[in-house]
Image (cartoon, grey):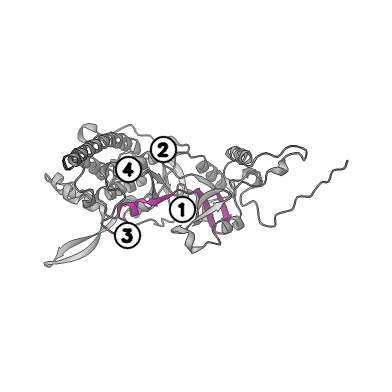
Amino acid sequence: MCCVLRKKRRDPSPRRPFPRQFQANDDVRHNGGDHSSSFASGASRTSSSTSSSMASVRNMVFGPATYNFCEISAATGNFDPSRKVGNSVWRGSLGNVSVAISRKQRNTGRFTSEIQLSSLLRSIHVLHHQSVVKLLGACIEGKYLFLVYRFVESANLRDCLRSKHGAHISVLSSWLSRLRVALDVAKGLEYLHHLCSPPLIHKHIGSRNILVSNELRAQIAHVGVSVLTGEVEFRSTKLPEDPKISPDHGMGEIQPENSSSRRLCRSRSIKISGVQGYMPPEYISSGEVSFKYDVFAFGVVLAEILSGQEAMCTTNGGVSDQKVAKRVPLPDLLHSVMTGDDSKIKLRRWMDPLLKDLFPLDDAYMVASIAKACTDPNPVNRPDMVEVGVHLQKLFISAEQFDATVRAHREILTESLQPR
């Protein structure tokens, strides 16, 4: 009896964009490679489902999957425009897994070594929360970083608030659905800021980076991009005292709590990059990025959910008895609405007309107060996401009760209109 040993063919494509010590075994990938070579020739073959499960377990141990550029190109159909689902984002398939591949330009000067980048990638790969899109792996090709996320069948929040098919159409047509999305995003940010180690600043929170599924549940996309691309640099520092929301006064009164260590990012060159409308004043003036950056951006998103308007909205201003359209940050309009004795009256007019007045005004006022506190010009006066999450959770429970009441009244009205 003779045994024939076959020499394993070498893959001509580059296999290790990251240092060897941070890599998983080449046969262990999310795309489900051939694992039969790992077994003795006389052993029975394992089923494909078992192999896939083993690959998943091994990948949990070894960390994020690493891909070469050939795999990324093949997965996206050579970056086929028809597969593009966002700005520099393509839908693809790696093995039997649907993925979203995001291409980002990295700042190579921010990392002293590839080991540092690999360590950051590992930290983000282990994040697991129902409101955060999962990072599966990455590929480095020159100055570009390709981040591979699990694909989510969804639409972004901006398109859900105002459909591309018509300004009179909204997927989120009920008060309950909008509160659910707001709560999901708040819980996702609470997880990133307070429950994962090390804590993470997103820096790109916006209605186009929030995905809403068919079940109308929200997930935060592009988590870790600002860190992995070297857009921001982290260092530990002390920030001023965080505010605490007074439950007796909604969001109108801020009470300081004990100060704690926070993480602050400063840009070496003070290069400002971001989406207009979501950038807080302290970032525009000095390039500082803290957790309060995300809180400000969340407040803008909350204002979008309430009003249906965009972060930079068009309004008419009187100039020489003529109405001239101008672009105004949504927080400015929100603060104007929430100022004065007639703020509730102004708020009702400001709310998205697609809600058709089917919302409890007192609860809407509380949500608007949260958005106002989050978008305070002074970062010290902004609440943290734990406080925001607590208040939104209570308001969501109230929204469920309101929704049940509305449905009950509709059923009664429908029955009364039935022919006898």
**Badge 3 density bin: few <14, some 14–19, many ≥20, Cα 10 Å:** few
Vertical relation: 407 (above or below) 267: above
Residue pictured at 75% horizontal, 50% vertical: 8
Marks 4/3 in contact by CB < 8 Å: the verdict is no
Please tell me in which quadrant of the rendered image residue 261 appears.
Answer: top left
* Residue holding disc 1: 231
N-terminal label among 1 and 3: 3
Task: Calculate the distance from the C-alpha at mark 2 to the C-alpha at mark 4.
Answer: 14 Å
Residue 144 painted magenta: yes
N-terminal label among 2 and 4: 4
N-terminal label among 2 and 3: 3
Start and end of the magenta stretch? Answer: 137-166
Q: As rendered, which of 184 and 328 lies closer to the eye? A: 184
Amino acid type indicated by mark 1: Glu
* Residue holding disc 2: 191
Please tell me in which quadrant of the rendered image residue 397 appears.
Answer: top left
